[in-house]
Amino acid sequence: MADVLVGSERRVLISGYGYGLPPQPPPPPPAESQLLGRLDQIDLRVRSDLMDRLNLLESRIRQLSSELDLDVGGKAAGHAAHQLVLGTSSSVPPVEDPATCGAQTPPTPSSFTPKDSFLIDCGGTAPLTADGKSYKTDAQANHLLSATDAIRVAADDKADVPSPLYATARVFKEEAVYSFPLTVPGWHFIRLYFFPLKGGDVDLASVTFSVVTDDNVLLHSFTPGDKPVMNEYLVNATENHLALKFQPLSGSAAFVNAIEVVNAPDELVTDSALAVAPLGEITGLVHDAYQVLYRINVGGPAIGPAKDTLGRRWETDAAYVQSKEAVKDVSVPTSTIRFPEGTSRLVAPALVYASAARMADADVGSPNFNLTWKVDVDPSFSYLVRLFFADIVSKATNDLYFDVYIGGRKAVSGLDLSTVAGGELAAPYYKDFVVNSSLLEDGKLSVQVGPMGQDTGRIDALLNGMEVLKMSNSVGSLDGEFGVDGQKADDGSGGRKAVAAVGFAMMFGAFAGLGAMVVKWYKRPQDWERRESFSSWLLPIHTGQSFTGKGSRYGSKSGNTFSSTMGLGRFFSFAEIQAATQNFDEKAIIGVGGFGNVYVGEIDDGTKVAVKRGSAESEQGINEFNTEIQMLSKLRHRHLVSLIGYCDENQEMILVYEYMHNGVFRDHIYGSEGKAPLPWKQRLEICIGAARGLHYLHTGTAQGIIHRDVKTTNILLDDNFVAKVSDFGLSKDGPGMNQLHVSTAVKGSFGYLDPEYFRCQQLTDKSDVYSFGVVLLEALCARPPIDPQLPREQVSLAEWGMQWKRKGLIEKIMDPKLAGTVNPESLAKFAETAEKCLAEFGSDRISMGDVLWNLEYALQLQDANPPEGARQGGDGDDQDGAAAAGGGGAVVPAGGAVPDASTAAAGELFQQLADMQGR
């Protein structure tokens, strides 16, 4: 990799030799070094042109070698091309990549020759070539035009027009129709050029007219103004002809400078895409018409029609990228881009995939922001957004994961380009999204990419290109609310097909479900313990997004296999849950919470799971059951407990999680239930893991998620003691863009609750930070957060711990079992972090990202100079009894178990203050 200075802008150029493959001997130094040396001295346009010529030579060399039956690989061709361009030679041949030796799969076509190609220079009298295209004159295309009164207008001085295409025009005072005979029905580009030339008896800058096809309104009551305009459309012609009608407003006129009607490859538009709100698949896209609003080469130069086999124009992202200082442009030679077998080379040119924008500080820190682009759109329409990706920054596969947001909503979580693009780096991949007006803010559509979170590989994100296409509404219009026949569009028509389909399906499903209920009631089983009550069928719970029968809020059943209709994980039948837990055997109980009991169970081939069964007496009930499912279904992170599935039959509320072999963090702090207390380094690592999970919660979605119940019993440990945050039943979405907090009733757990949240009932992510500060002190001191049996000044761990911190004597209250094992500098940084978490006001507290950074630094300090006791692997003084007053062991009974009486007393004390309950 090499930095190339282009003007005043530094970009990264990555050599195409052996990129993303096992290490190979470097290419011949003379050619490579001289190429980079020359690139340092030329601007971006020249560099782009040079690289294109280089790629063309490379392709030509391969072709010639094939004709001459020579075995010349890709790198050898590239080396020969370098020699031809630079006039250099080398006696050292490049090494052929073993991964590419042997027979190659024939690539998909990289060029496209249209069967229908009508290019008309309206008003032109001589053949015209512009942007690599040859346009016919009016006389040559006259047989296509039906008009009673067509006036030719030409510019007095061609120097006054922005392009030769705008130098002449055809003006119509009555409806004029261009009829194009089509060789192949299907997708066709329509490009219309408008520039109001001066001269004649009509002021073209103020005329008003419409342009329609037989099925679609392209322009309605259009007034061009005094700027050049090129509108591009994509329509699916179903007949063997296409009519283009120019309709002037009464008393006005219509005009056009140039017209293009060119067929496009079928793969350019697929029938389905991912709808962003609500999230799900939408179909029927081939029946829409589209207007191309933006076609952007992110991180790279503008691409003209001559460099795109479909004649498209790509602009730079300079006008749309936000916070430019956070973005770093990168590029590679187009020869680096590898199209997997079956991947279309026509959807976007290789030049788009060969450049990208990535996070500017991805290599030096832990960024928690998103790269953002915003474009102006009409909020009364829906949009097809196509994003282009190619991982040109990673050095190994499965190293880059990031999230994609459209309109502020997470559209893709944990995108792994090397996997979706066929297991290779620098392989093209694109994804289509449908966005409705609900995601548009002040006429702006935003596209964002950002890191998925910690411990998911490289902290980075990238985007190579994007297209934004306006979708026709329910009456086929792309401009205005009326169709060709004058019919008015439905309200919210952007999602018309999906809504109509869902509405019909719901109506049909309701009748079918009612009939099924009646039949099943008469055939109901007599096994009273396992049967489904009639009331549970008759009163299903609605989530606002789906409805299915059989007593399930989320799932549907096909045969013996249950599946979620909302991507919420596996649906378990109640019988499966009973079998997994031995009919809820009390011996299988591994935990008890406010929601209910937690059982260990086995499913399928013996996989261990944790089964949380909601209690009928639980005050938390259905709301938290729904919250837990919906939160965990959209969250995936190494430090968050994974939801496997759920069951909501028989009025049950059951959640099934991955099994965490080492239980809760709290037990390992106190050494309860026969567990040995953890050494300092392991406690630090667990705190770091939990901080990573919380940091992902706070930053991994557009609004962020606030956990609201952070405590040591909600931090679970797997068989390798990796920490995972659990229990999301109280979680809330964070404040929106224009909010500072979420106003909500107080919920949480005693001793961990943010006092500012308690006073003001205003929730922010800093409430989680406060709770985590208590967790840090608990990990350090090995005592519960609240113990009413102690003297008044020691009841609250947070207050008591901060008193000793301010005295500079935090080591006095440290767990005696850690004595002699903690580096003083590590302890000081840890205590300082806890203090910053426990600040009285949320605005004074640090973020979870800062907490994470500080804890990682504390771990580095511990590793750099571990005390003698830590090097010997001991736990310090192995004291079983209580330590002296003031020490952490003073409040932990023999054996390290937490006194149940203390916990109960704390609960009674705080129940008198507020009706709040943790889990």
Image (cartoon, grey):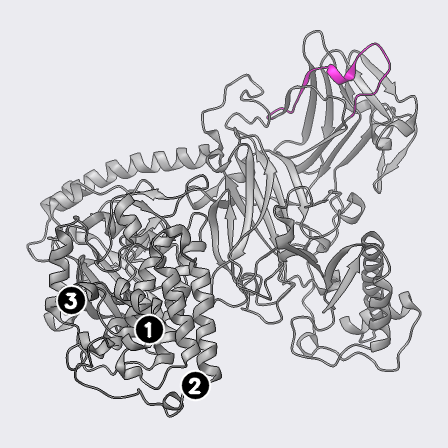
The residue tagged 2 is 866
Of circles 1 and 2, the one toward us is 1
In the image, residue 495 lies at what x, y percent? 46, 34
In the picture provided, is 884 more to the left or to the right than 319? left
Q: Is residue 875 left or right of residue 895?
A: right
Q: Which SS does the magenta portion mostly show?
A: loop
Secondary structure category for the residue under label 1: helix
Q: Nearer the viewer, residue 455 or 656?
A: 455
* Nearest to N terminus: mark 1 or mark 2: 1
- Name the mark nearer the viewer: 2 or 3: 3
**Residue flagged by tag 3: what amino acid is it?**
Pro
Q: Circle 3 sits in a helix, a strand or a loop, which is it?
A: loop
Asked whether the beta carbons under mark 2 and mark 3 sit within 8 Å of each other, the answer is no
Mark earlier in primary sequence (1, 3): 3
Q: Report the residue at 43% width, 37% height from top.
A: 498
State the mark number for residue 791: 3
Three-letter residue code for mark 1: Ile
The secondary element bearing badge 2 is classed as loop
Q: Image quarter for residue 881?
A: bottom left
Point out residue 343 in the picture as x, y percentages from the top left corner.
63, 57
Q: Earlier in the sequence, mark 2 or mark 3?
A: 3
On the question of residue 39 being in view, the answer is: yes
The picture places residue 79, in percent across and down from the top left corner, at 83, 72
Q: Is residue 651 left or right of residue 843?
A: left
Crowd band around label 1 with a 10 angstrom C-alpha radius: few (<14), some (14–19), many (20+): many
Mark 1–mark 2 CB contact (< 8 Å) = no
Q: Which residues are magenta?
A: 195-216
Residue in front for this viewpoint, 413 or 370: 370
Instruction: Please give the name of the residue rendered at 19% of the width and 50% of the height, measured from the top-left corner.
Output: 916
